Amino acid sequence: MFKHQREIRIEWGDCDPADIVFYPRYFAFFDASTGELFNAMGYSLSRIREQAHCVGFPMVDTRSQFYKASKYGDLVNIESEFTEIGRASFCVQHRLFNRGDLAVECSEKRVWACVNEEGKLQAQAIPDDVRNLMLS
């Protein structure tokens, strides 16, 4: 399945007074990594909104395990990969490495969401062209 990786440097604003990453910041890192995963496939959120007429891919479940702290100034690598593709939902696995060691693992379940005729948000089938790229 499609994979992407990116490096980020831990900033001062990501950290708590003990100088380690405040855990909610990891979820922001992973959310941005999902966006970058789609960008790497050629499907930016603006393209999804303009061409597919959908609002994006809201999260319906997320889970993380924390193994090693990351600190201010650390350069970390985030590997993101699609792990399951359903009709209207998909799962992404993120693995954050710090100096080669697995520091955090996160799984997300998201839905392909569009606004229906009544103006309500509704899960819809993932378009075939997007699905094919996810599976590549």
Image: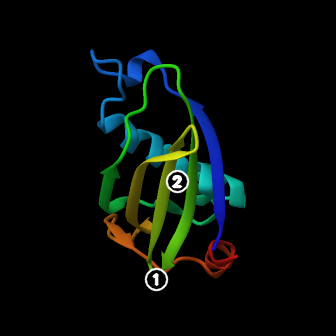
The quadrant in which the N terminus is found is: bottom right
Can residue 44 be seen by looking at this rendering?
A: no
N-terminal label among 1 and 2:
2
For residue 86, the mark is 1
Q: Is residue 109 left or right of residue 11?
A: left
The residue at the point 28 percent across, 18 percent down is: 18
- Residue 38 position in % (x across, y down): 61, 57
Residue at 31% across, 30% down? 22
Whether residue 81 is visible here, answered yes or no, is yes
Q: Quadrant of residue 103?
A: top left
In this view, 15 is above or below 101: above
Marks 2 and 1: in contact by CB < 8 Å?
Answer: no
Q: Nearer the viewer, residue 30 or 49?
A: 30
Secondary structure under the numbered disc 1 in the rendered image: loop
- State the residue at coordinates (39%, 62%): 108
Say few, some or many: other residues with alpha carbon within 10 Å of mark 2 (under 14 / 14 to 19 / 20 or more). Answer: many
Q: Residues within 10 Å of mark 1 (few under 14, many from 20)?
A: few
> Is residue 63 toward the left or the right of residue 80 in the image?
left
Is 21 rendered above or below residue 118? above
Q: Which residue is mark 2?
A: 34
**Position of residue 80 measured from the top left corner of the image (x, y, whole percent):** 56, 57
Q: Nearer the viewer, residue 52 or 135?
A: 135
* Image quadrant where residue 9 sits: top right
